[in-house]
Image (cartoon, rainbow, N blue to C red):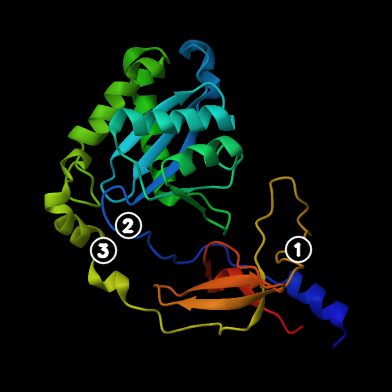
């Protein structure tokens, strides 16, 4: 088959967006934090110009930290993150977030380097599911308070929202309140979060080391529907992980490894 035709057929072949993904596994308290922004621009005038809420959650204990932001500029987000560290005396080994400019910038890098924190991103272009779930919970709580109080001044209620979430609500995934998680009960929480069935390896490996692949593209809202579903650039499988389901490490043809891991359904083996 003609090389250009093969390339075109591969790049426009169907891509499956929804499929079972591995669970995020944290080694313990403050091993892995996740973060996202909750957009509150609509209510900025009633809240002294604060338009966002920075949410940060310890993925193991589900303990959350919230800071109001006027902008999502890198300097302000980095300062808010450091404020959480200084106020609590806690810091993670890893921070999971998306690749937005609010996180990927020189100010964030400076703060993370200062405290020895490594940032990693979800390279399949999705946000942290745990941080997004927290955003949905916060959004629901705030809307209820709008109704109860008859106004939209969420900034006044933020301390109470944090306290209720951490100290009063029993989190279904851990069977206790986030504030109750401590070193003494870490093993109990670990059994709640990660039953052994989640660690069973997925034997249905779709790719082998050395295979050449394309990566699925997530189209933007305004991108033409006929834009390709897969990258024009070709990559190579450089590692296979026995997660459930299996995940893969890939590298550029020049040899540089791409950070993050990919699912089989995000990769397309190329005939070229």
Residue at (57% x, 83% y) in the render: 209
**Mark 3: few, some, or many residues within 10 Å (few <14, many ≥20)?**
some
Q: Earlier in the sequence, mark 3 or mark 1?
A: 3
Which numbered disc, 3 or 1, marks the residue closer to the eye? 3
**Left or right of 89 in this view: 241:** right
Q: Is residue 147 visible?
A: yes
Please tell me whether residue 22 is drawn above or below residue 84 in the rendered image: below
Q: Quadrant of residue 270?
A: bottom right
Q: Earlier in the sequence, mark 2 or mark 1?
A: 2
The foreground one among 212 and 47 is: 212
Please tell me whether residue 38 is drawn above or below residue 13 in the rendered image: above
Q: Name the residue carrying label 3.
A: 194
Question: What label does residue 71 carry, if any?
Answer: none
Residue furthest left in the image = 184
Residue at (52% x, 77% y) in the render: 239
Q: Which percent across, then down, holds residue 73? A: 59, 29
**Mark 2: few, some, or many residues within 10 Å (few <14, many ≥20)?**
some
Question: What label does residue 228 carry, if any?
Answer: 1
Q: Which percent across, then down, holds residue 6? A: 81, 80
Q: Name the residue carrying label 2.
A: 26
**In the structure shown, which secondary structural element does the residue marked by tag 1 occupy?**
loop
**Mark 1: few, some, or many residues within 10 Å (few <14, many ≥20)?**
some
What is the spatial separation of the Cα atoms under label 2 and label 3, in whole angstroms? 9 Å
Please tell me whether residue 131 is drawn above or below residue 160 in the rendered image: below
The mark tally for this picture is 3
The foreground one among 79 and 232 is: 79
**Left or right of 246 in this view: 30:** left
Position of the C terminus, as image quadrant, is: bottom right
What is the spatial separation of the Cα atoms under label 3 and label 1, in whole angstroms? 38 Å
**In the structure shown, which secondary structural element does the residue marked by tag 3 occupy?**
loop
């Amino acid at each position: 088959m003609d090389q250009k035709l093969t390339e075109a057929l591969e790049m426009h072949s169907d891509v499956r967006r929804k499929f079972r993904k591995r669970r995020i596994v944290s080694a313990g308290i403050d091993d892995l934090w996740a973060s996202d922004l909750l957009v509150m621009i609509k209510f900025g005038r009633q809240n002294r110009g604060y338009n966002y809420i920075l949410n940060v959650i310890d993925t193991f204990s589900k303990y959350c930290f919230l800071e109001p932001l006027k902008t999502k500029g890198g300097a302000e987000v980095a300062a808010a993150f450091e404020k959480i560290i200084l106020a609590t005396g806690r810091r993670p080994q890893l921070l999971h977030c998306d690749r937005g400019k609010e996180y990927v910038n020189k100010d964030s890098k400076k703060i993370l380097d200062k405290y020895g924190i490594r940032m990693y991103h979800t390279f399949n272009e999705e946000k942290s599911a745990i941080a997004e779930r927290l955003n949905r919970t916060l959004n629901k709580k705030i809307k209820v308070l709008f109704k109860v109080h008859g106004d939209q001044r969420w900034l006044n209620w933020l301390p109470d929202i944090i306290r209720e979430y951490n100290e009063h609500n029993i989190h279904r995934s851990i069977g206790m309140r986030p504030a109750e998680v401590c070193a003494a009960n870490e093993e109990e929480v670990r059994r709640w979060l990660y039953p052994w069935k989640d660690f069973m390896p997925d034997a249905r490996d779709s790719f082998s080391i050395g295979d050449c692949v394309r990566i699925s593209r997530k189209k933007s809202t305004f991108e033409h529907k006929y834009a390709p579903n897969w990258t024009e650039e070709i990559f190579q499988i450089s590692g296979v992980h026995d997660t459930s389901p299996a995940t893969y490490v890939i590298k550029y043809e020049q040899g540089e490894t791409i950070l993050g891991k990919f699912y089989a359904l995000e990769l397309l083996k190329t005939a070229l």
